[in-house]
Amino acid sequence: MDDGVDYGDKLFWLSVLIQRRYAQICAELDLTPMQATLLCAIKDEPGRMTRLATSLGMTKNALSQLVDRTERRELVSRVSSEQDRRVIMLGVTPAGKVLAEAVFAETAKRLPEIAAGLDADDRQTLERVVTALVDASGVEGPAST
């Protein structure tokens, strides 16, 4: 691993494994991965459309299209902010909340299975490293208002 190419290659394939498992979970729940991620981002509290676009790494236009498709399925709803009526907030509907909770639970349960072949010490190390990476990345959990 002199130049990090092998390490980068392994990280690439790890991301493929994770994405494949996540896509499988989403498909079982009749959601696209982006719909599921959107629902999980707002499952506990509504989020501003502009902030959601940023945290999901999407343009405002792409997020609007995703929201339109998800709204047609009655999983999300747009509402004006109580503080500023110009601000559009996105929240989950009761059906969206149920699906978001299911995605979250299944993902939390089944993603660790990719490390099933590791011994206990390696699993602990992986958990510690993954936690440190996520904490250091600044990735937001639930959408902030």
Image: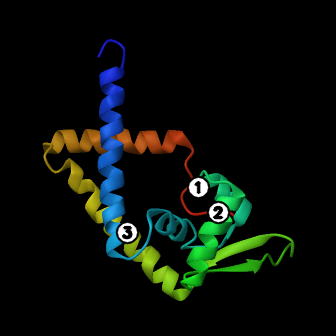
Q: In this view, does 128 lie above or below 62?
A: above
Q: Which of marks 1 and 3 is nearer the N terminus?
A: 3
Residue type, mark 2 in image? Leu
Q: Are marks 2 and 1 in contact (CB under 8 Å)?
A: yes
Where is residue 3 drawn, in percent x and y?
36, 14
Q: In this view, does 65 lie above or below 30?
A: above
Q: In this view, does 18 lie above or below 68?
A: above
Residue at x 31% of width, y 64% of height: 24
Q: How many callouts does the rendering have?
A: 3
Where is residue 81 drawn, in percent x and y?
79, 75
Horizontal side, residue 29 vs residue 116: left or right: right
Circle 2 residue = 63
Horizontal side, residue 28 vs residue 144: left or right: left
Q: What element carries label 3?
A: helix
Where is residue 92 drawn, in percent x and y?
58, 79
Is there any visible trace of residue 92 in the rendered image?
A: no
> In what quadrant of the picture does the C terminus appear?
bottom right
Is there any visible trace of residue 102 in the rendered image?
A: yes
* CA separation in Å, label 2 and label 1: 9 Å
Q: In which quarter of the image is residue 21?
A: bottom left
Q: What element carries label 2?
A: helix
Circle 1 residue = 56
Residue at x 30% of width, y 39% of height: 13
Where is residue 10 drawn, in percent x and y?
29, 33
Q: Are marks 1 and 3 in contact (CB under 8 Å)?
A: no
Circle 3 residue = 26
Residue at x 66% of width, y 52% of height: 54
* CA separation in Å, label 3 and label 2: 18 Å
Horizontal side, residue 129 vs residue 36: left or right: left
Q: Quadrant of residue 15?
A: top left
* CA separation in Å, label 1 and label 3: 17 Å
Q: Is residue 124 above or below residue 34?
A: above
